[in-house]
Amino acid sequence: MTDLIFQSSDLANKRTEVLEAAREGLARVRDKDGTSLVMLPERRLRLLQEIARWSRAHMRLDDLLRRDAIPNVSDLGDLAWLRVFDADDLREFVEDLHNALVAAHSDEDTLALDECIKAWRITARQIEDPLRRSVLIGKSTSDDYIEVHEPQ
């Protein structure tokens, strides 16, 4: 990335150069009033928006958990789908989310972040059902299992 700054008149006179700079990652354009404007690929903007959104959520949840209280639905806000988890699970989510954010930033792709959120949402939906919850996190003994034979 260079420190090249285009003038607003360059949008008409040197539009291919401005667009090429934007395609390569970033084009700065100085408006007539001195405002600095930036043009970048939409994919990059979406990546930055998603990282910012989930970073805010990460910081908010991390802060709530540091208070040693289980956050209520109101505290969680748009993360209310996490209400089914206990404090240990929420801490694990915060750690997983942190790792996914680092990977998304490093990879310049939200795939790791999307997969992390999707997996936790699926788990939350499963745990919300009382029967599934008892199967997934309930206690089991050897009497709960039987030997299965191969079908004939």
Image (cartoon, rainbow, N blue to C red):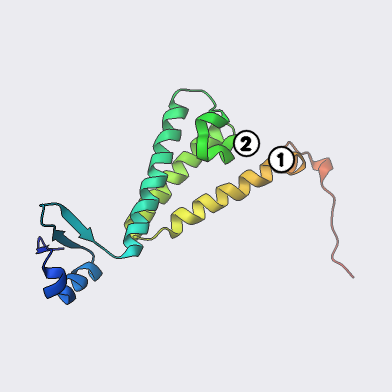
> Going 41% across and 29% down the picture, which residue do you hit?
63
* Image side of residue 44 versus residue 124, left or right: left
- SS at mark 1? helix
- The residue depicted at 10 percent of the width and 60 percent of the height is 3
Give the vertical position of 102 relative to 66 (above or below): below
* Image quadrant where one finds the N terminus: bottom left
Q: Label 1 crowding class (10 Å Cα cut-off): few <14, some 14-19, many 20+? A: some
Name which residue type carries label 2: Val
> In the image, which disc is placed on residue 84?
2
Instruction: Residue at 51% x, 34% y: name it.
Output: 76
Q: On the picture, is 122 further left or further right than 61? A: right
Total marks drawn? 2
Query: From the viewer's perspective, is the residue at label 1 or at label 2 nearer?
Result: 2
- CA gap between label 1 and label 2 equals 10 Å
Label whose residue precedes the other's in the sequence (1 or 2)? 2
Q: Mark 1 highlights which residue?
A: 133
Indicate the amino acid at tag 1. Arg
